[in-house]
Image: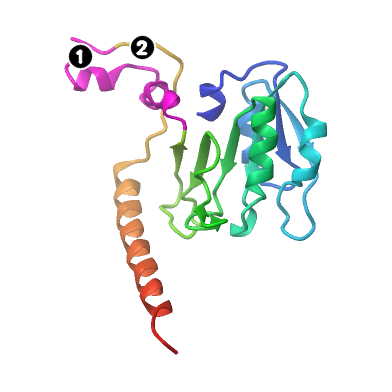
Amino acid sequence: MTALLLNLGEGDEVVVPSFTFISTVNAYVLRGAVPVFCDIRPDTLNIDETQLEGLISSRCKAIIVVHYAGLGAEMETIQRTANEAGIPVIEDNAHGLFGKWSGRYLGSFGAFATQSFHETKNIFCGEGGALVLNDPSFVDRAEVIWQKGTNRKQFSQGLVDKYSWIDIGSSYLPSDLLAAFLYRNSKRARLFKKSASDLAAVPR
């Protein structure tokens, strides 16, 4: 969805860390974009923020950041470099849910963040994910893409008399069974997080 929202196509470039799962890169290659691999830091295995500037060309359309194993990348430097070049940052936050960088939640820095609910993650439903939109200008189109390219939301709100195909899109919805499992799992995770916070506050 991030590739679609940014209108990525043939010849566009995206900077990606050299160490990540293949799905991170496939999302952009499938739209025709060219991955530009950036080396990683040996201490965190995250993208090396000091190399970004030299990898950004006039064809670069996005910088993909992976918070590997829940360790936050150097987001202040990355955001500064991206802002100077006028390029959006996309956080692959599959490993970073509830993690923080400088007191701020991972997934809240870039224009977008992607979240995984694969069975190997802390909150899971077998397969599935979420797209976090930190830039409100993308919300309306994201809803259309999410609804298979239709204006179904406008129809459900009574703004149009029938819904129709108005944009590219696909089926991003989990099954009802997986959604129910994820809902229960997320509630348990919130309770666990609260219990852990309460425990941490107990004087030793």
Q: Position of residue 72 (x, y in %)?
A: 61, 54
Give the secondary structure at mark 2: loop
Name which quarter of the figure residue 50 lies in.
top right
Q: How busy is the neighbourhood of tag 2: few (under 14 within 10 Å), some, or many (20 plus)? A: some
Which residue range is magenta in the image?
A: 135-163
Q: Amino acid at mark 2?
A: Trp
Give the total number of marks visible in the rendering: 2
Give the secondary structure at mark 1: loop
Question: In the drawing, does residue 165 fall left or right of residue 169?
Answer: left
Q: Which residue is mark 2?
A: 165
Answer whether residue 35 is magenta in the image.
no
At x 41% / y 21%, what residue is drawn?
141
At x 19% / y 21%, what residue is drawn?
157
Q: Amino acid at mark 1?
A: Leu
Answer whether residue 160 is magenta in the image.
yes
At x 64% / y 45%, what residue is drawn?
76
Q: Which residue occupies the foreground of this view, 184 or 105?
A: 105
Question: In the drawing, does residue 55 fall left or right of residue 168?
Answer: right
**The disc label shown at residue 159, or none:** 1
